[in-house]
Amino acid sequence: MVTAQDDSKNFMQALEDEMKRLFAGLGDQGALESESDGQLEVVGLLKLALTSELEASEIAAHWLPTTSEIEAKTILAEQCSDEMRHYNLIFKRLQELGEDMDNFDPFAQGYSPLYHYLRGLRTTIERIAAGPFACEAVAEVRNAQFIDFCRRVGDEKTARLYEKTIHPEEIHHHRLGREFLLRHATTAETQAQVISAVRSSLAIADELQNLAEMTTGLHNIPVS
């Protein structure tokens, strides 16, 4: 007899396998190239990261008051705090690199389409699927590529900042999201919500714009 928990594990494994196939299409620096329109340099990528970190912190904070489950509140509160701390660490690193940050506006170009999509999510299962699970999975890929890029151009200090602090914490957020979905995405309805939220988040993410059409394959994942 297949239990709801067994079904949830199978569902999540299929979802993660599909995401891995998508990410494999990015190659060694595809996430960075897509995010920056091919303008690969450390300072520019760090400034883009500032906007992403601040958006992630604000989204988690926006969701907190209307999320009733304490387990989910804990995940969002931790992410909100960590992302804001990442913002400050990256800001400081830019100053160390000689950038004048006094008048820097991370939202000079406005909020991203992904931010607006995430703000509109209403259910906890969708929020955790789109935020900690999907967006942090993208961050994991992006950060790994950025660490390698920094080392290729000789910026060991920035590489270590990501490798020792930012990257592990965003992997942690993703794993918390995965564990939550394993426990709660146990019905056809909740699994369909997860698929929709993940598909939409990946299709909108800047780092995956060139591969957006591939995310449509996610709808083939079986649900309960």
Image: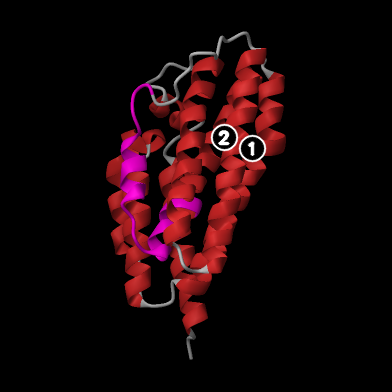
Q: In which quarter of the image is residue 187?
A: bottom left
Relative to 162, say whether 104 is above or below: above
Relative to 108, say whether 74 is above or below: below
Q: In screen coordinates, is 4 left or right of 205?
A: right
> Could you tell me which residue is drawn at 44 percent across and 71 percent down?
185
Across and down, in percent, residue 214 comes to 31, 46
What is the secondary structure assignment of the residue under circle 1? Answer: helix
Across and down, in percent, residue 23 comes to 45, 43
Q: Name the residue under label 2.
A: 143
Name which residue type carries label 2.
Asn
Please tell me whether the stretch drawn in magenta is mainly helix, strand or loop.
helix
- The residue carrying pointer 2 sits among few (fewer than 14), some (14 to 19) or many (20 or more) residues within 10 Å by Cα, namely many
The answer to whether residue 40 is seen in the rendering is yes
Range of the magenta residues? Answer: 108-132
Name which residue type carries label 1.
Ile
Q: In screen coordinates, is 222 left or right of 132?
A: left
Across and down, in percent, residue 16 comes to 47, 57
Q: Is residue 118 magenta?
A: yes
In the image, 99 versus 194, the foreground residue is 99
Q: Name the residue under label 1.
A: 166
Q: Does the magenta stretch include residue 199?
A: no
Quarter of the picture containing the C terminus is bottom left
**Label disc, if present, on residue 198 of the rendered structure:** none
Question: How has the structure been colored for display?
Answer: secondary structure
Across and down, in percent, residue 216 comes to 28, 52
Q: Quadrant of residue 146?
A: top right
- The residue carrying pointer 1 sits among few (fewer than 14), some (14 to 19) or many (20 or more) residues within 10 Å by Cα, namely many
CA distance for labels 2 and 1: 8 Å
What is the secondary structure assignment of the residue under circle 2? Answer: helix
> Could you tell me which residue is drawn at 30 percent across and 41 percent down?
212
In the image, 186 versus 14, the foreground residue is 186
